[in-house]
Amino acid sequence: TNPSDGDEVYYQVYVNGQLSGNTGYWHLRYNASTGYWDFLGGPALSSTDSTVHSTASTSYLSSNAYDYLPLNGDYDVSYGSELAIDAANALNQMQVGLTQTGTTVHTCYFVAVSQFNGSSLNCSTRVTGVTGAGGTNRFVQDLYMSLSGQSSNFYPLYVNVTPIRVK
């Protein structure tokens, strides 16, 4: 059936961002002027990769922090990592990035001039116009690399996704 303006539904989602596990509900209201269901409340999709990733790679590496997007639409995404550099007095540029089904859509940088442990790199962006959602067709994933080739540690990496409006 076709929804009417102002209709409300509760849509069940897997809150760990995967395709199984704990579930929650997104509260949505239909907006006839846009043809979208506006997000009114509910849990974010949330995924964490708690493995310590040590690398000097200057190319992106994939983490196990990813969320499947269940519906087409627009989403707010936050992602990042705790960071550590092994070498003392070394300039290092570390980067985390966000990929949407294999295409990098956002990046954040961190520049350090000495050895450190436990700094956070927290990033956020809006991903709009998601299509092909559902199942494993569409997801966002946290990536990581050391831009300067210095040994770097990333842990934990995380991705949190909140819908703005969906179809």
Image (cartoon, helix red, strand yellow):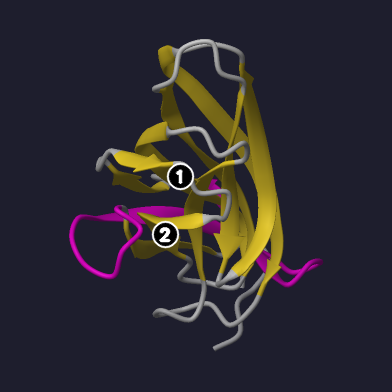
Q: Magenta span has 27?
A: yes
Residues packed near mark 1 inside 10 Å, few (<14), some (14 to 19) or many (20 plus):
many
Q: Is 150 left or right of 117, judged from the image as shown?
A: right
Report the residue marked by disc 1: 160
Pick the front one: 100 or 45:
100
Q: If the image is split into quadrants, where does the C terminus sit? A: bottom right
- Residue at 39 percent of width and 22 percent of height: 86
SS at mark 1 in the image:
strand
Label 2: which residue?
67
Distance in Å between CA atoms under marks 1 and 2: 8 Å
The residue under the point 31% across, 53% down is 15
Of residues 70 and 84, the one drawn nearer to the viewer in this rendering: 84
Task: Residue at 41% x, 23% y: name it.
Answer: 84
Question: Residue 90's quadrant in the figure?
Answer: top right
Q: Which secondary structure lies at badge 2?
A: strand
Work out whether residue 94 can be spotted. Answer: yes
Q: Position of residue 24 (x, y in %)?
A: 29, 53
**154 over 60 or under it: above or below:** above
| Residue type of the residue flagged with mark 2 | Asp
Where 67 falls versus 135 (above or below)? above
The stretch in magenta equals: 16-40
